[in-house]
Image (cartoon, coloured by chain):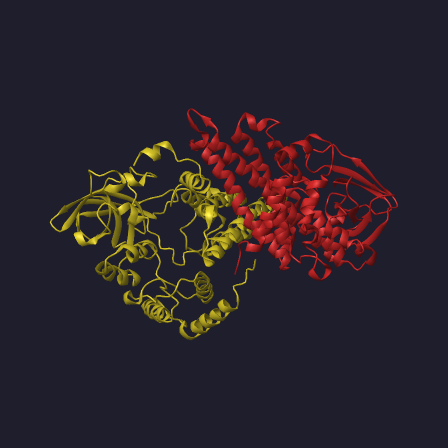
Chain colours: A yellow, B red
Amino acid sequence: MDLSYGAEAESFRTDVRDFLRGNWQPGALRGSELKAYINAFRLTATEAGYLYRNIPKEFGGSEQPADVVRAQVIREEFGRARAPMEITGNGMNMLVPTLLEKGTPEQKDLFIRKTMSGEYQWGQGYSEPGTGSDLASVRTKGELVGDEWVINGQKIWTSQGDRATHMFALIRTEPQASKHAGISYMLIDLDQPGVTRRPIRQMTGESGFYEFFFDNAKTPASWLIGERGDGWNVSRTTLKHERAAIGSATGLGAQFDKLVELAGEVTRNGQPAIKDPEIRQALTRIEGYVMAHRYSSYRLFSLAAAGEEAGIIQSMMKLLLTETGHEMALAAQELIGDDALVEPASAGTRGRGPEKWLDQIMGSLGNSIAGGTTNIQRNIIAERGLGLPRDLAMETDK
Amino acid sequence: MKFHPSEEQVAIQDAVRGTLADVWPKERVEKFVDGEADFDPESWQALMALGLGGLLLPEDQGGAGLGLLDAAMVVEVAGQAAAAGPLGAQMLAAAIVARSTNDAAKAHLDALASGEAVATFAFGGDWLPESWDATPEAGSVRFVQSAGAAQLFILGTKGGGLALVEAGEGVSIEPVKSSDRTRRLSTVTFGGAKAHELFAPGDPFVARIFDAALVLVAADALGGAQYCVDLSVAYAKEREQFGQPIGRFQALKHQLAQMALEVEPARALVWYAGYAHDADLPDAARAAAIAKAHLADRFVSVGRAAVAAHGGIGYTWEYGLNTWFRRALFDRAYLGSPAVHRARAADLAGW
């Protein structure tokens, strides 16, 4: 095993560094000037082949061959230089890969560039109040009237719902068909009279999610991606292009470093908490999981670079991240002590004390739910990873 | 960048696994568990025939010139099979002696590499090198594995040095009634034994060897824990209740998923600890300490969960799961508990 990236990647790294030195000099730019500079930089970086690597040139990408090592080097160097990478969000992460695989030339033309430029911002319209983990039971219905779909129903748990201009949604268009075969994947303009949005206030007090109500909302017939009734499969399209990254492990590691920092700042039994044997045990115990997660992400990355199957470990990363986050929350709770009685000021404001850890302590609970609940993750590990038989209810409810 | 096993490493693991399947099947394990011996010559010779004794020995000294990561992968498979015999100590002994400058000690290298001379660790005190308190002239060391079969002891000497001690005159052995029946222990008393000094107390190589031994215990625990998961999953697929395999019930399914979640990600932690040691990275000692602590805890935890997942049959002597549970007790205590190594890891971080 060898954790170095190799000579080819290091020479590529030199190229990226040279490029950044020559092209990323925002200096003291602020506000709209900075924004314009960033937009121009993204175009130059795309021309150089560093951004939008999986997007064809005709749609404004750089169309590079998939190479997870190069992609990782780019992430690292852009991160080091604090240079902006691709626009992120549901549009780039989920819709564009789906369009690239299932969209018509007209659909790609209509949506990809505007998503890349940030003009179109996308919300995900999958969950509904009644669906939960049984996503294929969606009831929001679409009826084709002339050359328009007329949509009625409700979608929920849409993140970035405040900014979203458009939505990609699972809509029941074939009520006579079986559960999974009755769904279509369609795009909806959210700026129309038939759409109402409402923030959902979550337990942290912040509003990260929105719900959307559709009351005879309309969308063109040509905005349906893939075939009618094939929406379930369309939504499962995941382009594997350079998806493997060492990113999430770095995030968990950074959070652990902050926890250690916290232990150095707060006092316990009359000394810095980090000198307390019990705290030292708790931190190093958690570190075992943090390291297991970090080096498993290297393992996944290495397998992807070699073009090999990842196996069961792939299905475990989210749950491991969630559970380690819970462990850190409990340790943080112990460390902040009575400061847990103080409501923290909003993230990003000055003068936040140890009570700011309440954001992580409560936020870690969101991780057990978002993106597939912990119990669903356990089902996936057991069924796909360990080969245990599927639940009878799921077997028969098709 | 490569952080998954090479074809060669997979081939070595397959060879060890295949050999143990032949010479150390369930019946042999059971017979050994119910007997009194602290060593099994037949399975030992079969493993040594693979060249494992010289795995860590440099190529110019007749070995395979491989690293601790490779040794850890071997020990993992041995742990999965509940192999008897001090395999990790044997591999490390060759590396230790080869690294020393004592020619009289080095005369034993061929016998160590071939496995003809069985070597085992005799670390006294409370396991950590600075607490070692014996010398070849005088002292007692508790918990020495396969002492009755050993011709050579890697003795941890007073203050943290290493000596190679020959079995025979001046070495007496008192078996301990051991909870882990596949790795039986003895108290060994040294009194004027024939010995060769290898490393003086305080030599940094001693700490490095102790760290390597920790990584191998972690690897053994990884293999044992994997066995507990595999056995439980297989049982859940085959055992029927209420007209269906119990593995279809979500409660059990989730327990099994949780067990797998404890073990599979930890595999990369063991790899890293081995790799960091071989590459002599600055965090190698911490990685070894954390790996030992983490894997020992995981093995105990999935060992307990495996019994629960099986129900009554898992609690019986006859089913044999307790053999691995007892190995978990061994791996947890041997060379220092998780708490000891976590405290060390905190110290090493400068906290």
Q: Is residue B300 left or right of residue A78?
A: right
Q: Residue B14: image x %, image y %?
A: 58, 48
Asked if residue B273 shows in the view, the reply is: yes
User: Where residue B12 appears, x then y in whole percent?
Assistant: 60, 51
| Residue A341 drawn at (x, y percent) | 47, 42
Q: Is residue A99 above or below residue A377?
A: below
Q: Toward the viewer: A257 or B309?
A: B309
Task: Report the number of numbered marks.
Answer: 0
Q: Quadrant of residue B181?
A: top right
- Of all residues, the one furthest to the bottom in this rendering is A22
**Residue placed at 61% from the left, 34% from the top?**
B26
Q: Is residue B42 above or below residue A35?
A: above
Residue in front for this viewpoint, A362 or B297? B297
Residue drawn 53% across and 42% down? B262
* Residue A315: % across, % down: 44, 46
A198 vs B67, left or right, is left
Q: Is residue B95 left or right of residue B286?
A: right
Relative depth, front residue between B95 and B211:
B95
Residue B98 vs residue B256, the one in the foreground: B98
Taking the image as drawn, is residue B283 in sight? Answer: no
Horizontal side of B245 relative to B299 (left or right) equals left
